[in-house]
Image (cartoon, rainbow, N blue to C red):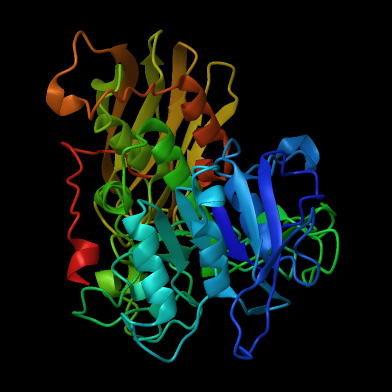
Amino acid sequence: MAVIDSGVDGTHGDFPNMVKNVKIAAPIVAPGVSGALYVDTPNSDLTSGHGTHVASTIAGSGQMSTGGKYKGVAPGASLIGVGAGDAISILYALQGFDFVFKPEVRETHNVRIISNSWGTSGSHFAPYNPISIASKRAYDFGMIVNFAAGNSGPNNDTLNPYSASPCVISVGAGHAKNTMKATNPLVSKGMPGQLASFSSRGIKGDAFHRPDIVLPGVNIIAARATSGSIVEPYLGMDGTSPEPMYSSISGTSMATPHMSGVAALMLEVNPSLNMDGVLAAVASTASPMYGKDATGAVRQLEDWEVGAGYADAYAAVEKAASTAGTRTTVETSPLTSWTGTVGTAVDGTPIAAEHNHTVVVPTGASAVKIKTDWGNPAYDLDLYVYDGAGKLIASSAEAASISEEVVIPNPVAGTYRVQLKGFTNAQTAYTGTATVDRITPFSELSRTQVQGELHVEFSLHLLHVLCQSSLAKWLVTAAPEGIASVDSTRCARG
């Protein structure tokens, strides 16, 4: 995983898998001679902290946080820090790509993903722009290039033009946590599943000038550089719970490393995927997103605003595993279904506006998925699951939507209480379903299931890491059907 950014503070304590860290030294205006110096250094992020935060979101260990709470999406991924700028400016982006393309870097460290939380605005995709050419070259190497969609929303035609390349994945930003009751004035208010107002929009009807997918990018807590950071330490939702080694930042810059981390998890279960396969799996399992129009009516957001929708990490990795030709497969089977009614609620009252149902989870499950569906996108209901001892073990609290879903990895067998609680809704009926995943071996592998001699184990450890990371806050829809089609022509068409 290469991170082209302001650099990475490898001395922070959260980067045990930092395999390379360089700072680029080059003339800002070429004086007639080419070349750049790539200086190895333990800390290449001396004046910003932006790149450190990004890298931590991808693969930080969380070691320096209380209880290891702020772990990255893919903490086992190897990181290459490429310090291509200072403060808020990326000065040497092209030299950063050149460094990653060097055989002694790309081949030695098996670089599969390049994460880019930077860009520009006020123009459109230009195929012969040097960054566009570099992105195409990375695509040809089999790399997944992720770019921030930009922070110039909510107006249309504000997309980062580098992210509009058909050879990259353009990442928009959404809310991941319910912060409506936060008392820290630095915490942005919002509900899970909402599109961030600042997230750049594309052009209606344009196949490429639009975000491809939305991931968490608001109030993202990750490592704070120990030197030169321009962001204050995070003080908690209440403003009195300091985490001095971490900071909270919002932006599509923060959503992009989430996509990079998810891509790393997908490549772990299926190394044969290219950019098209990763995007197809993420897009086909994404959840629709909703907002309000000028009259206040709820509407589903369109692809020029949110691409395929809000990413579902669990479902995307599951989809990637289903195409891997693995020695094991994930079998999903129905467990139970039920119906119920939730009474009227306004801003979470009255308390009686809830319905409870028990679900018996059997032994041997690698995951249990519980979904509640009421079908009205104007209603806001929240889903909570409690174990036999009454401990809350999973929850999903999006804003207004048609359903809520949770995924519980490696569940202990027993009786669980499923509670659907009204927040803002009229009395409504709903349907609940529960399914279980089991990891089972193939009896034999067909030639279409195997590419060459590649066999990948879909590990229980991966499921545990995935659902214990920051992604646990936004696992919402996991109902993939069939096999992800890999459209290898998108980049060529562009």
174 on left or right of 426: right
Up/down of 140 relative to 404, above or below? below
Quadrant in which residue 361 is drawn: top left
Instruction: Please name the residue shown 27% across and 41% down the image.
Output: 430
* Residue 416 in view here: yes
Q: Nearer the viewer, residue 81 or 66?
A: 81
Instruction: Name the image quarter holding residue 8.
Output: bottom right
Q: Is residue 84 shown left or right of residue 273?
A: right
> Extreme front residue here?
33
Number of numbered labels in the structure image? 0
Toward the viewer: 294 or 300? 300
Residue 278 placed where, x, y %?
32, 48
Position of residue 448 relative to residue 209, above or below, is: above
Quadrant occupied by the C terminus: bottom left
Q: Residue at x 26, y 69 (%)?
A: 303
Q: In this view, does 410 lie above or below 167?
A: above
Decide if residue 190 is in sight here.
no
Question: Residue at image x 17%, y 60%?
Answer: 489
Q: In this view, does 99 lie to the left or right of 359?
A: right
Residue 294 x/y as whole percent: 34, 85
Estimate the x, y position of residue 418 in percent, counting from the top left. 43, 29
Pick the front one: 147 or 220:
147
- Image location of residue 56, percent across then percent down: 66, 51
